[in-house]
Image (spheres, grey):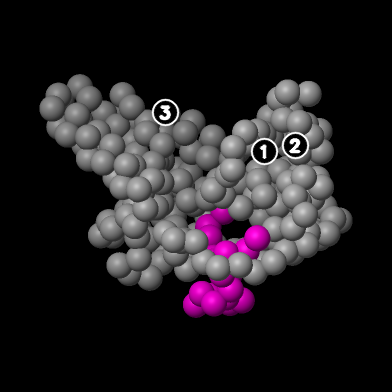
Amino acid sequence: EIIFSSSATVYGQKKPPPFSEYDELDPISPYGRTKLFFEMVLKDWVNSNLKNRAIILRYFNPVGAHRSGLIGEDQRENPNNLMPYIVQVAAGKQNYLSIFGNDYSTRDGTGERDYIHVLDVAKGHVKSVEKIKKIEKFQIINLGTGKGTTVLELLKTFEKVNEVNIPYKIVQRRTGDVAKLLANPEKASSIIDFKCKKTIEDMCFDAWNWQKNNPCGYLD
């Protein structure tokens, strides 16, 4: 039995979000293509033996840390996701946040994402372990909230929840970024009885709480 961590980047932009597990796939980044490749390998593996079972979990945008502040994201290299940069600016490690483009077809022009708390991701895995022997032997399931938050909305929520100021600059778009990436979470609810519980406010509070308690990551 295998539970595989895949990614919403496999969907691409052939149709507008929200994306369901039955939508056509068209990853536009190398990362997304590698995830799709391993999904195909796992499907063949499941079909090769009656005993083999797999659940593929397509994460949308995991954010946050454990509420205790003891477990969090310790970035050692330049991250590709947004929250590590926000907390670095809040901690004074960066002078400002670079926002890659403000001319997307979203509410405020900045990219819109479906952010999911890392603890909800963990619970999605627990539910998958509980259900893997009770459902069809090969399943693909989105892990997301179904609710979109733009870069500026996340930034303003972080500032409000944590009472900090995050300077930012608008810079050019990044290659491979899409305007919106939102989940249809209905299959997760019906197949593994999973729904996200944590809010954007929870994600912002917990991410900053981890950074404050661990200014040098796990090295301090």
The disc label shown at residue 42, or none: none
Residue drawn at the location 73% of the way across and 46% of the way down = 88
Check disc 2 and report the residue beneath it.
210
- Report the side of 68 relative to 30 (left or right): right
Gap between marks 1 and 3 measured at Cα: 22 Å
Whole-percent x and y of residue 17? 41, 66
In which quarter of the view is residue 79 placed?
top right
Q: Inspect this view and state whether residue 16 appears.
A: yes
Query: 10 Å neighbourhood of mark 1: few (<14), some, or many (≥20)?
Result: many
- Front of the two marks 3 and 2: 2
156 relative to 56 in the view: left or right: right
Q: Read off the residue under disc 3.
A: 129
Q: Where residue 20 sits: x, y (%)? A: 35, 58
Mark 1 — residue? 65
Q: From the image, which quarter does the N terminus lie in?
A: top left
Between label 1 and label 3, give the one nearer the viewer: 1
The residue under label 1 is which amino acid type?
Ala
Secondary structure, mark 2, is: helix
**Mark 1 residue element:** loop
| Magenta stretch bounds | 98-115
- Observer-nearest of 53 and 59: 59
What main secondary structure does the magenta stretch of the protein show? loop
Q: Secondary structure at mark 3?
A: helix
The tag earlier along the polypeptide, 1 or 3, is: 1
Given the current orientation, which residue lies at the most extreme right position? 163
